[in-house]
Amino acid sequence: MKTQANYEIDWANINLDSPYERDQNILDPYDFDTLLLEIGCNIRDEDLTASNIEKHAQEVLRAKYQEALSIVGNNIQNIRDKAIEERKEN
């Protein structure tokens, strides 16, 4: 039996009957604490400009967006099937 602690999600085949998988974010959150940590680790003092910070944040946001699009694309049939099933139930 799998528990949440050892539960691995197949992001290319989300099980929409699973409350745990269904509750997962399609688009990963990104907060200011994470951005500041990344700036501290990835941008040298001499390169710490508004332009470089914005460039870094945009790269991260674009990557998260592309990943979300990929997840939706890989699961579009599952999503369609579940939407049809739920429509029939109502």
Image (tube, rainbow, N blue to C red):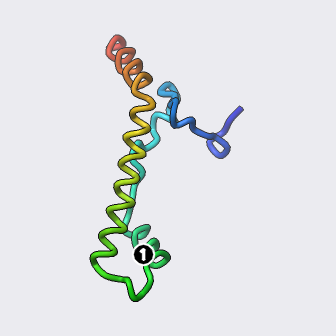
Residue at image point 34% right, 11% down: 88
Q: Is residue 35 above or below residue 1?
A: below
Q: In the depicted view, which residue is nearer to us: 48 or 90?
A: 48
Image quadrant in which you'd find residue 23: top left
Classed neighbour count for the residue bearing mark 1: other residues with Cα under 10 Å, few (<14), some (14–19), many (≥20): some
On screen, residue 76 versus residue 51, left or right, reads: right
Q: Position of residue 10 (x, y in %)?
A: 56, 35
Q: Quadrant of residue 62?
A: bottom left
Q: Is residue 77 above or below residue 44?
A: above
Residue found at x 42% / y 51% = 28
39 sits to left or right of 12: left
The type of residue carrying mark 1 is: Ile
Quadrant in the picture for the C terminus:
top left
Q: Residue furthest right?
A: 1
Instruction: Provide the residue designation for mark 1.
Output: 39
- Rendered location of residue 45, percent (x, y): 42, 87
Instruction: Look at 35% across and 57% down and name the residue there.
Output: 61
In the depicted view, which residue is nearer to us: 70 or 24? Answer: 70
Relative image position of residue 26 (x, y in whole percent): 41, 42
Q: How many marks?
A: 1
Q: Camera-side residue: 77 or 6?
A: 77
Question: Residue 11 or 23: which is nearer the viewer?
Answer: 11
Looking at the figure, which quarter contains the N terminus?
A: top right
Q: Is residue 37 above or below residue 18?
A: below
Quadrant of the rendered image containing residue 77: top left
**Relative to residue 41, is residue 73 depicted above or below?**
above
Residue 56, position as x, y percentages in the image: 37, 68
Q: Residue at x 62, y 42 (%)?
A: 4
Instruction: Report the residue that reaches farthest toward the top.
Output: 88
Q: Secondary structure at mark 1?
A: helix
